[in-house]
Amino acid sequence: MAYSISKDAQQLLCEIINQISLTERRAEQIRIQLCRKTSFNPYACFKRLDSMNTNQIKPEQIVQLLKENDFFVQELNTLFNKTFMKEFLNYQDFLNLILPKTDCELREITAMKQPTKTTVEKSIDYTLAQLFNLEYNEAINLERLKTRLSNFYNADQMFYSMDSLNNNILNFKDFDRFFRRNGLLLYEEELIAFFYRIDKQRTGQITLNDFRRMLEPFQKLEQPNSNNSSQTPKQIVSQSKSSNIFIDELGSSNKAGQIIQSRNLSTSNKKKFQSNRRASSITESLQTTKLTENYLNDEQRFIDLGLEILKLEMYLEEIRLKLQQQKDFNSMDFFHFMDLKNKGKVNQHEFVYFLEQLQIKNLDVIELFNYLDKDQDGFIRYSDISEFISPSNMSSTYICKKPAKNSLLSYSLSQLFSKSTIGFIQLLFNQWNENEKIIKLKKKQFLNEQNLYLIFNKLDPFKKGSFNRQDLQRFFDLYNVKDDIKLLYKRLGKLNKEINYKEFELFFIN
């Protein structure tokens, strides 16, 4: 039997499916990037994490990897179980996590590499940490969405609303039909990525158990209701629906239970119950006041962080402007000096060589390379470099108007630029590095997830699910901050694009 569910719940389910699909596609990009590295050895990476030599990877070992690569780390065991549904990972689990799913040839070549215990390169270590960080962050995002959905309906109701043929399975057509019914389109590659993550048996079909595992919040999976274990899906659906109505009418199931129970109490017990209830009320009121104070403090901290970023970015802008004003500086020459093979793109090794020529030390090369590599394809292009070295208020016409030297000739850095110009280039990279350290330190001391969500809602007054530069400026205006927040918005996302919650949250986590 097909169940009818509200439009809001359907839209929320579409969002969850899209989120799962996007996570899988992003994870697949990192897997392919990892496995294409010639020095990558799966067993060596596994043993690098298995520090206790137990042939198991435990939460604290993953957390250590993330900390060593400067990723923000939240709670240990809960987050690990929420992500992988296990208390530890063995070697086979590890292979399933890191091997590509779409590139069968690369998967086979990587899996057949001879096991070694060689030291893992820093670039491989960082990419591996990126993969775990992505899985963790998406698990948090999905948990929030699943909890919201569970307040409307349970997994069984959602499943039977999509199972139009009543055959207890969902295939590609069912999901396509469901999305079209909500005025959305799910492309084939997005649907395939979703099935890769949910369809554990690789049958091309989603069963009720698969669907439950996908939608049930972790707390519910952790504490299953023994009363429901022997009931049929139809009975569970019926019971959930009636309990939802009850909660809507009385506020919460626990309080409702107390009210019903109090009707059968004796007079003395009633007084005792009412006294406890008043005490509970006072406690709740105090907790609410404390939460409000914390929220207001977090708003102020967000303003302070924004102003700090603005100050640092404005200093970088001054350096960029002075660099562009140098008579011998040309952005095309600058890029061609990096582009050793004249391919129009620069890989990580070429970038490292370029920084060595500049004699820049104590710089996080991988972090800077990933910051410049906007599309995360492993290469830096002229547009990436031009954006980094150019002031935001300067047109590209002015930047490119100075004549470039013959890029096919081999120049040393001193032949291309004067000492003062090289000094400004060094200052730009070093200052960026210092800025990142300061910003990262402040972000780590900043918001918890709940208050971050409240701040986002304040930035999104029209409930679009995203905010733009004008919304951010309006928020700062409320605190009498009249500075132009263009540079801050650029750090949060792209100037011509709205920022959704996921992008907002990633700014604080990365």
Image: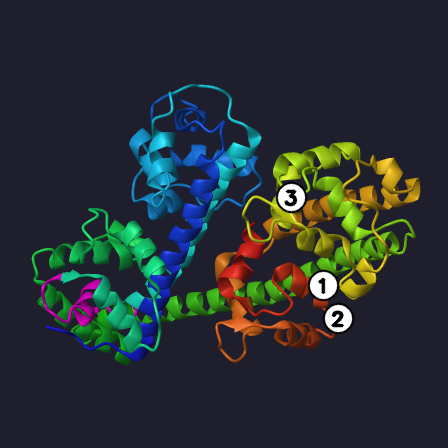
Position above or below: 159 against 323: below
Q: Whole-percent x and y of residue 448?
A: 52, 56
Residue 136 in sight? no
Q: Quadrant of residue 81?
A: top left
Distance from the alpha carbon under mark 2 to that under mark 3: 38 Å
Q: Is residue 145 left or right of residue 178?
A: right
Q: Residues within 10 Å of mark 2 (few under 14, many from 20)?
A: few
On the image, numbered disc 1 is attached to which residue? 487
Q: Dot 3 lies on which element?
A: loop
Residue under label 3, please give it.
343
Marking on residue 484 = 2
- Mark sitting earlier along the chain (3/1): 3
Q: Is residue 201 left or right of residue 99?
A: left
Between 147 and 94, the one lying in front of the other is 94
Residue 413 lies in the magenta stretch: no
Residue depicted at 88% across the width and 36% down the height: 414
Q: Contact, CB < 8 Å: mark 2 with mark 1?
A: yes
Q: Residues within 10 Å of mark 3 (few under 14, many from 20)?
A: few
